[in-house]
Amino acid sequence: MMSQNIDEIDRRILQELQKDATLSVDALSARIHLSRNSCWRRVKRLEDDGILKARVALVDADKLGLGLTVFMLVRTSNHDPKWLEQFRAAVTSLTEVVGVYRMSGDLDYIIRARIEDMKAYDRLYQKLITRVPLSDVSASFVMEEIKDSTEIPLF
């Protein structure tokens, strides 16, 4: 359920900024048919409330030689706070890792990484297992990226 502080105008602002975060306040206000000052105040409130977390540039990983996406499927037999702290430190320090998710069900964690090739995956794997004990790690490599979006649905 969406926050009660978010109205239709806020949703339109968020939709436009998710498509192009470089929009000036003037361009944004024109797109949503709102005065410049009202638009600026709303964007500022969305930032202050933490709804707008950051404005970033999306980089084409393929053009930088990081065309292989791997999902590392991790199981562990240790779930104590000290191990979790060690795991968190390990995965956040690995620059190849772009996402880490604690899961319900059979898997404990899924790690998403962007790498150059299989040799780079092996180096990543070796770095990870030397930093934190894991029960099982398997990997699946993306053959075709059908959809990958950073946009949050705003219905």
Image (cartoon, rainbow, N blue to C red):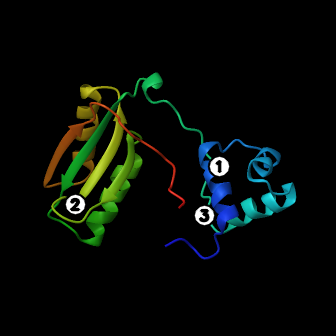
Which amino acid, mark 3?
Ile
* Badge 2 vs badge 1, beta-carbon distance below 8 Å: no
Which residue in the protein does label 2 denote? 108
Near mark 2 (Cα within 10 A), the count class, few <14, some 14-19 or many ≥20, is: some
Which residue in the protein does label 1 denote? 17
* Badge 3 vs badge 2, beta-carbon distance below 8 Å: no
Task: Quote the CA–CA distance across marks 2 and 1.
Answer: 34 Å
Of labels 2 and 1, earlier in sequence is 1
Q: Nearer the viewer, mark 3 or mark 2?
A: 3
Task: Quote the CA–CA distance across marks 3 and 1.
Answer: 12 Å
Q: Quadrant of residue 128?
A: top left
Which amino acid, mark 2?
Asp
Residue under the point 40% across and 51% down: 92
The tag on residue 51 is 3
Which amino acid, mark 1?
Leu
Task: Quote the CA–CA distance across marks 3 and 2.
Answer: 28 Å
Q: Nearer the viewer, mark 2 or mark 1?
A: 1
Residue 40, position as x, y percentages in the image: 80, 58
61 left or right, relative to 135: right
126 left or right, relative to 29: left
Q: Secondary structure at mark 3?
A: loop
* Badge 3 vs badge 1, beta-carbon distance below 8 Å: no
Residue under the point 85% across and 55% down: 36
Residue 89, position as x, y percentages in the image: 37, 56
Residue 140 vertical placement versus 131 (above, below)? above
Residue under the point 20% across and 41% down: 139
